[in-house]
Image (cartoon, rainbow, N blue to C red):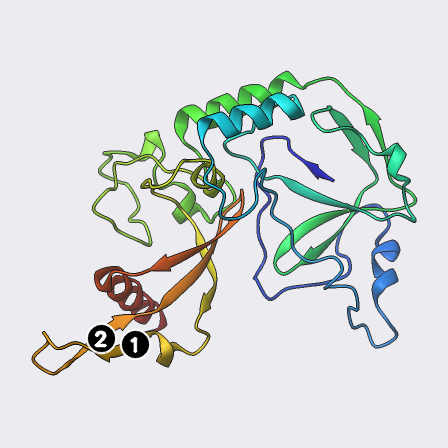
């Protein structure tokens, strides 16, 4: 089950996975660990980032409208879609709430999967029907107005792009500098729901890259027009994450890759 209240689910380090760490009954979360403390069900319950469409789908306005009519709610532009693991021995399928319904969840436990905190519905957990909370909607509208899309991030990143921080003399310098600093920030969910091609400015963290070996970032191929007879290129894909989703991005322009690598070298130095 995936739930939403307009807030952001703050991430952990991408390599972190555990079988408990908060909630009503942590012992229930430890059920998947053996005597050695190792986690055996990571493949069965991995990190999960909800999206209304399959990866690679070009989300047109008509497609989004059709989906929203079918499910009966408007896809929120920001705020985490928080996954709650509901196993078949803790709750029956016919007892699950229907999509779009407002509910209250009680006595949830939690665990972390690949840096993502997830709720864990145990035999002690329960849910009940509820009414839409006006304060949630008001906070959501306020965040949209301010383009406060990165509540999940450290203060140095989350302050970038907010209306209050634009044009002030005492603004803290962000960790990254672009030529489009005045463009409002968007979430990765908004990117995935925008018809391609499009341009976006996002506050994200890098959680992975391919190839794994940095020596394979560069590629070389024959080029008769080149003075050396060869041409160097780049082959780099970054896995990006924010409070709303995860997205693989292919960097193809040499200038893009060189800026990324230069910035990484500065950080490590």
8 relative to 28, above or below: above
Which mark is on residue 149?
none
Mark 2 is surrounded, within 10 Å at the Cα level, by few (under 14), some (14 to 19) or many (20 or more) other residues, namely few
Q: Which callout, 2 or 1, points at the residue further toward the start of the chain?
A: 1
Mark 1 is surrounded, within 10 Å at the Cα level, by few (under 14), some (14 to 19) or many (20 or more) other residues, namely few
**Count of numbered circles on the image:** 2
259 with respect to 69 (left or right) = left
In the current view of this chain or complex, which residue is farthest to the left?
A: 227
Of 234 and 221, nearer the camera is: 221
Residue 124 lies, in percent from the top left, at 91, 43
Of 86 and 150, nearer the camera is: 86
Of 225 and 118, nearer the camera is: 225
124 relative to 134, above or below: below
- Which secondary structure, mark 2? strand
Residue at the (84%, 40%) spot, across then down: 107
137 with respect to 46 (left or right) = left
Q: Quadrant of the N terminus?
A: top right
Residue 131 lies, in percent from the top left, at 74, 17
Residue at the (26%, 79%) spot, across then down: 220
Check whether the beta carbons of the residues at disc 2 and disc 1 lie within 8 A of each other: yes
133 relative to 86, above or below: above
- Which secondary structure, mark 1? strand
Residue at the (79%, 33%) spot, across then down: 105
Residue 13 lies, in percent from the top left, at 56, 61
**Residue assigned mark 2:** 232
Residue 140 lies, in percent from the top left, at 53, 25
267 with respect to 128 (left or right) = left
The Cα atoms of the two marked residues, 2 and 1, are separated by 6 Å
Which mark is on residue 219?
1
In the current view of this chain or complex, which residue is farthest to the front?
A: 224
197 relative to 116, above or below: above
């Amino acid at each position: 089950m995936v739930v939403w209240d307009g807030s952001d689910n703050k991430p952990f380090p991408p390599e972190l996975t555990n079988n408990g760490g908060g909630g009503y009954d942590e012992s229930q979360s430890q059920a998947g660990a053996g005597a050695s403390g190792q986690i055996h069900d990571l493949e069965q319950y991995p990190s999960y980032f909800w999206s209304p469409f399959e990866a690679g789908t070009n989300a047109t306005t008509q497609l989004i409208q059709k989906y929203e009519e079918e499910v009966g709610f408007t896809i929120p532009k920001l705020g985490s879609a928080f996954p709650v693991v509901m196993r078949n021995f803790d709750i029956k399928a016919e007892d699950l709430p229907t999509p779009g319904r407002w509910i209250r969840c009680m006595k949830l436990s939690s665990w972390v999967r690949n840096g993502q905190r997830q709720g864990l519905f145990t035999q002690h957990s329960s849910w009940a029907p509820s009414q839409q909370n006006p304060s949630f909607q008001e906070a959501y509208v306020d965040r949209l107005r301010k383009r406060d899309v990165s509540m999940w991030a450290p203060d140095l990143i989350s302050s970038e792009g907010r209306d209050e921080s634009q044009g002030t003399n005492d603004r803290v310098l962000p960790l990254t500098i672009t030529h489009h600093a005045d463009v409002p920030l968007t979430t990765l969910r908004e990117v995935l729901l925008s018809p391609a091609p499009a341009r976006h400015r996002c506050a994200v963290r890098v959680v992975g890259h391919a190839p794994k070996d940095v020596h394979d970032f560069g590629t070389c191929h024959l080029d008769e027009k080149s003075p050396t007879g060869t041409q160097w290129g780049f082959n780099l894909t970054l896995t990006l994450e924010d409070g709303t989703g995860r997205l693989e991005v292919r960097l193809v322009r040499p200038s893009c890759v060189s800026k990324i690598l230069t910035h990484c070298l500065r950080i490590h130095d």
